[in-house]
Image (spheres, rainbow, N blue to C red):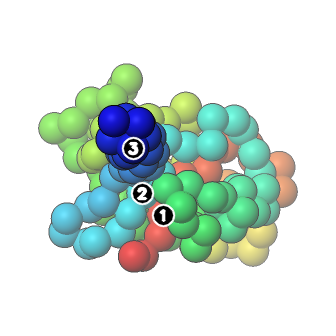
């Protein structure tokens, strides 16, 4: 009887851990990219955003990176609305999002506004935006 109770307890813990990991990520069925379920939750410069994603450990994965501008544009969806952000997968955002893509001028990088669906280019050293991480399974 104790063995059955222990088995059920361990199974319940394992199921909870797997469910928690799945709820913190979203996989785009079209691109097969796995996205963090939310951004980093704070304002950071571009280098800090890249570092945040490179060091992220989420859902038992460690190969996260900052998304390209094209990948960010690919999850924009005008029909979705998560607190004013038109983004697929129910991803939660706190600000505009840095991309890993260089901007049109030296020292700039593209970022994306999920409120209006537009890309913008800002100085990487002085602007403060959020980081949204992605990985390819």
Would you say 74 lies left or right of 57 here? left
Q: Name the residue at 72% across, 63% down.
A: 55
Residue on which the image places disc 2: 35
List x then y, in percent, for residue 20: 43, 41
What distance separates the C-alpha of mark 3 from that of mark 1?
Answer: 41 Å
Sequence-wise first label, 3 or 1: 3
Task: Depth check: give the residue in front, 29 or 123.
Answer: 29
Q: Name the residue at 49% across, 56% down.
A: 59
Sequence-wise first label, 3 or 2: 3
The secondary structure type at the circle numbered 2 is strand
How many other residues sit within 10 Å of disc 3, few (<14), some (14-19) or many (≥20)?
Answer: few
Task: Depth check: give the residue in front, 102 or 93.
Answer: 93
* In this rendering, the label closer to the viewer, 3 or 1: 3
Disc sitting over residue 134 in the figure: 1
Residue on which the image places disc 3: 3
List x then y, in percent, for residue 4: 33, 41
List x then y, in percent, for residue 130: 63, 44
Sequence-wise first label, 2 or 1: 2
Would you say 123 lies left or right of 116 here? right
């Amino acid at each position: 009887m104790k063995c059955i109770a222990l088995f059920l307890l361990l199974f319940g813990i394992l199921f909870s851990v797997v469910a928690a990991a799945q709820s913190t990520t979203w996989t785009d069925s079209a691109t097969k990219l796995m996205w963090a379920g939310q951004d980093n939750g704070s304002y950071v410069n571009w280098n800090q955003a890249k570092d945040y994603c490179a060091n992220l450990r989420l859902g038992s994965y460690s190969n996260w990176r900052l998304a390209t501008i094209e990948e960010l544009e690919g999850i924009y969806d005008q029909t979705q609305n998560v607190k004013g952000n038109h983004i697929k997968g129910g991803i939660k955002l706190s600000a505009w999002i840095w991309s890993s893509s260089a901007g049109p001028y030296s020292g700039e990088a593209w970022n994306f506004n999920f409120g209006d669906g537009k890309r913008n280019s800002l100085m990487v050293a002085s602007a403060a935006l959020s980081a949204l991480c992605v990985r390819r399974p």
